[in-house]
């Protein structure tokens, strides 16, 4: 049985495919393996956004909630996707909840550690910003399409 190191797992995750090996080494220096059981929260609205996650296996519901109302799932993240964008921009607090559906295996990336490395190496920071912006645009488009589906197109 082959054992792969954390750096190799990070480098092979679709979010980081094509990232320079030196940058992957920097990122993996902030990484750890994590597991969440069914119903566990990866993060909750208002908490400090100190980590983001590379989902290896499982599904994560992104939810919004209001007092006295059942949370609404607006997107489900699956295998080989990334969860958590709020770590990038001050005040570094989660604006949504992320909840495991079934068991979730992931790589947690320490955001403070990575922000420090991005400040020290702006080329790394720019490369990561491009990748996260791509995810953000993709999710905004998905939300737009979902809203059109829910509300219908005016005649």
Image: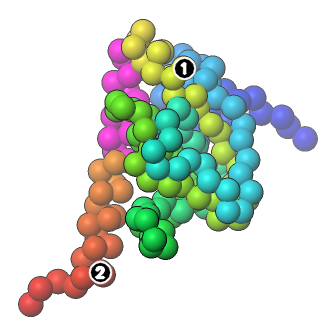
- Residue at the far bottom in the pictured view: 155
Assess disc 2: are there few (<14), some (14-19) or many (≥20) residues with their C-alpha within 10 Å of its C-alpha.
Answer: few
Q: Could you tell whether 89 is left or right of 78 in the image? A: left
Tell me what residue is drawn at x 49 percent, y 36 percent.
48
The percent position of residue 136, horizontal first and vertical second, equals 34, 48
Front of the two marks 1 and 2:
1
Tell me what residue is drawn at x 24 percent, y 77 percent.
148
Task: Write down the residue under mark 2.
Answer: 149
Q: Can the viewer see residue 96 in this picture? A: yes
The percent position of residue 93, horizontal first and vertical second, equals 43, 38
Magenta region:
122-135
The percent position of residue 108, horizontal first and vertical second, equals 62, 37
Viewer-closest of 155 and 89: 89
Q: Could you tell whether 6 is left or right of 121 in the image? A: right
Tally of numbered tags: 2
Viewer-closest of 152 and 135: 152
Task: Write down the residue under mark 1.
Answer: 113
């Amino acid at each position: 049985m082959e054992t792969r190191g954390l750096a190799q797992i990070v480098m092979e995750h679709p979010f980081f495919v094509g990232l320079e090996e030196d940058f992957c080494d920097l990122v993996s220096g902030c990484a750890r393996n994590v597991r969440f059981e069914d119903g566990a929260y990866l993060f909750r609205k208002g908490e400090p956004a100190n980590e983001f996650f590379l989902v290896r296996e499982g599904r994560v519901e992104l939810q919004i909630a209001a007092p006295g109302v059942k949370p609404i799932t607006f997107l489900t993240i699956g295998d080989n996707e990334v969860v958590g964008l709020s770590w990038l921009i001050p005040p570094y607090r989660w604006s949504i909840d992320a909840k495991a559906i079934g068991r979730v295996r992931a790589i947690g990336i320490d955001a403070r550690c990575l922000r420090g490395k991005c400040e020290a190496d702006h080329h790394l920071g720019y490369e990561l910003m491009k990748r996260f912006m791509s995810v953000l645009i993709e999710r905004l488009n998905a939300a737009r399409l979902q809203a059109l589906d829910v509300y219908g197109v005016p005649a």
